[in-house]
Image: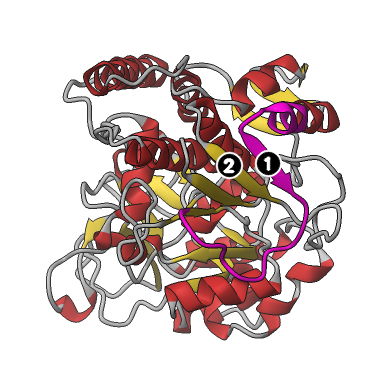
Amino acid sequence: MTEIVNVIGAGLAGCEAAWQLAQTGIKVRLYEMKPEKYSPAHKYRGFAELVCSNSLKAARLESAAGLLKCEMELLGSLTVPCAKENSVEAGGALAVDRERFSDSVTDKIKSHPNIEVIGREVTELPGGICIIATGPLTSGAMADVIRDLCGEGLSFYDAAAPIVTYESLDCDRVFFASRYDRGDADYINCPMEKNEYLAFYEALLSAEKVQLKDFETHPFSVYEGCMPIEELARRGVDTMRFGPMKPVGITDVRTGKRPYAVVQLRRENREGTLFNLVGFQTNLKFGEQKRVFSMIPGLENAEFMRYGVMHRNTFINSPELLNSDFSMRNRPDIYFAGQLTGVEGYMESAASGIIAGIAVARKIKGLEPLRLPLDTMTGALSAYVSDPYNSGKFQPMGANMGILPDIGIKIKDKKEKYGAYACRAIESLKKEMERAGYDSNR
């Protein structure tokens, strides 16, 4: 092969993309600015550095995280086997010794005959096909390059509200309606009486928050529209009732009266299986979010598919910019991978690198694309970040069973139900790999 592909960033996504290409015989230039330069969060010299946690989430197949890792292994992942080889005891999760894991990935990348590692910061795009995988803490110079490519479709802070499944809501306590009955009744409304609101308010004030790093404190003093709900509460007992919880224009269908306060949920996906809590960006710890937000009427048994976050995170408006293979619609020679695309999580980032690497390799070799089925976790994630329906309201998303299409049969037991989803996904992926003649063992 004479084509050389440039991969920028040797995090999880960049390493997976480079590995996929190299394994097919394609030459790769992998650019990594460490150890010449470090981001505010990175400290270790090695590739695929895990910054926030050493956990890669659940290992069991009947979980979203476990299913994702299983699919990644079928597709020839580099990082999943390295993680298993360097795992530490963590109950039902796959957790790793961070340095050993990084060293293992680094050694495999550096020793591959088709990968040339170039240790410097990239400040302008090299010529030819390029996969950009510079991560959520992309350096200033590279961020400028990405901004030139994406225009206004580049965000620097991740302010996301929690997402719950529709089927976990108590439909006897909530109702569909739009404010002032304008347009379709697209919002789910959770009405609160005064005593319920005051109890919720007090719980917010006492809930434990995530400790921010120095480089993450700036956005909260700047972006008023991204104010965490708990900070809004600190401004006064009624502040939320004049903000995201205002009851004006809403009539409780059960009482015929306006509620004291209301929490609105907005559809997150086309299928209506996921809904987000409108205006509930938060910096509370995940366990606290579960405790406090379950006090909202109708959400007592809510299943949270994503918790709210407020942190430094560079990502592009992928639904407006990318195809499902992570290539740019207006620049088919440029691909993105990792958290830049709006996939949230270590393994999700790595999976996007696999998808981008496979897509580029098959394009260079003139092979038919590998079309990941929508009922697989990899297929559902790539579809989510590239669906124009999500443009304009896009927020990062991690692997969860809520983004998979309904299985079509009623299964009450959650473990059994998710096991059925997983079996369907694995079977679908294997069929597509066979159809496309894709062999992860090369």
Q: What residue is at 83 percent from the left and 26 percent from the top? A: 100
User: How far from the left and from the top, in percent, is residue 323?
Assistant: 31, 53
Please tell me whether residue 158 belongs to the stretch shown in magenta.
no
Query: Which amino acid, mark 1?
Result: Glu
Between discs 2 and 1, the one toward the N terminus: 2
Evaluate whether residue 246 shows in this view: yes
Q: What residue is at 47 percent from the left and 79 percent from the top? A: 241
Q: Name the secondary structure under disc 2.
A: strand
Query: Which amino acid, mark 2?
Result: Val
Q: Quadrant of residue 212?
A: bottom right
> Which residue, given by chain and number where applicable, does mark 1 sit on?
116
Report if the CB atoms under discs 2 and 1 are less than 8 Å apart: yes
Q: What residue is at 30 percent from the left and 62 percent from the top? A: 329
The stretch of residues the image draws in magenta is: 105-129
Q: Is residue 437 left or right of residue 44?
A: left
User: How far from the left and from the top, in percent, is residue 199?
Assistant: 58, 61
> Which residue, given by chain and number where applicable, does mark 2 sit on?
28
Q: Image height check: is 254 above or below 153?
A: above
Evaluate whether residue 338 shows in this view: no
Q: Name the secondary structure under disc 1.
A: strand
- The answer to which of 79 and 263 lies nearer the viewer is 79
